[in-house]
Amino acid sequence: MCEYCGCQSLTAIDELTREHDEVVRLIGHLRSARQEGVTPRMAEVAREIARVLGPHTEVEEQGLFPALAGDFPEQIAALADEHRRIEAVLAEAAEGTPTDPAWPDRLLAAMAVLRDHILKEQDGVFPAALAHLGTEEWEAVEATRARAGSPLVRPAA
Ligand SMILES: [Fe+2]
């Protein structure tokens, strides 16, 4: 990874984008499970989404967001707040199928927030990061990724 050509930043953003794609794909499974009325399947998919989002959110919040919070304090605070709201609904399925009959609807509402959130990140945060972050900040993002791990299988180089 070199510091001059931008490959470091592009790799980091590419990985975050692929995680978003995977989450959007999983949200699709959630919709079909909801239509079929299979709450245990929804809980299973919720756990899968949480597994992808865990390291992803860590990289965003500990790597990317601190580097942008100075210039965009309100936007970054709002995005972090949405992370907490989304995590809370997903976490209800962590140990099994939630018994609250309102959970499937609350989950789908949270997933609508998540889809919108993903668009805000891809149209706002990621381009801003590519424009504003310097080498040291990308190194911090990379170090956070190394700590957090990657929930997706990396494509063969
Ligand atoms: Fe994200």
Image (tube, rainbow, N blue to C red):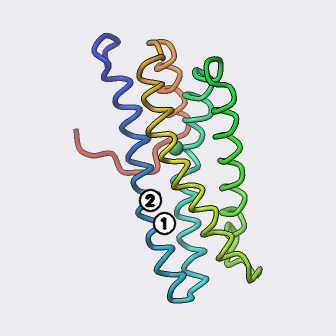
Q: Amino acid at mark 1?
A: Ile
Q: Is mark 1 within 8 Å of ligand 1?
A: no
- Badge number at residue 143: none
The quarter holding residue 77 reads top right
Residue occupying the far right of the picture: 100
* Vertical side of 130 occupied by 25: above or below: below
Mark 2 vs mark 1, CA separation in Å: 5 Å
Q: Return the residue at label 1.
A: 27
Residue 4 left/right relative to 157: right
- Number of numbered labels in the structure image: 2
Q: Return the residue at label 2.
A: 24
The 10 Å Cα crowd at callout 2, few under 14, some 14 to 19, many 20 or more, is some
* Image point (68%, 25%), residue name: 73
Residue occupying the far left of the picture: 157
Q: Nearer the viewer, residue 120 or 59?
A: 120
Quadrant location, the N terminus: top left
* Image point (67%, 78%), residue name: 97
Q: Position of residue 79 (x, y in %)?
A: 64, 40
Q: Position of residue 60 (x, y in %)?
A: 56, 35
Quadrant location, the C terminus: top left
Q: Nearer the viewer, residue 148 or 106?
A: 106
* Image point (50%, 41%), residue name: 149
Q: Secondary structure at mark 2?
A: helix
* Vertical side of 147 occupied by 98: above or below: below
Q: Amino acid at mark 2?
A: Val
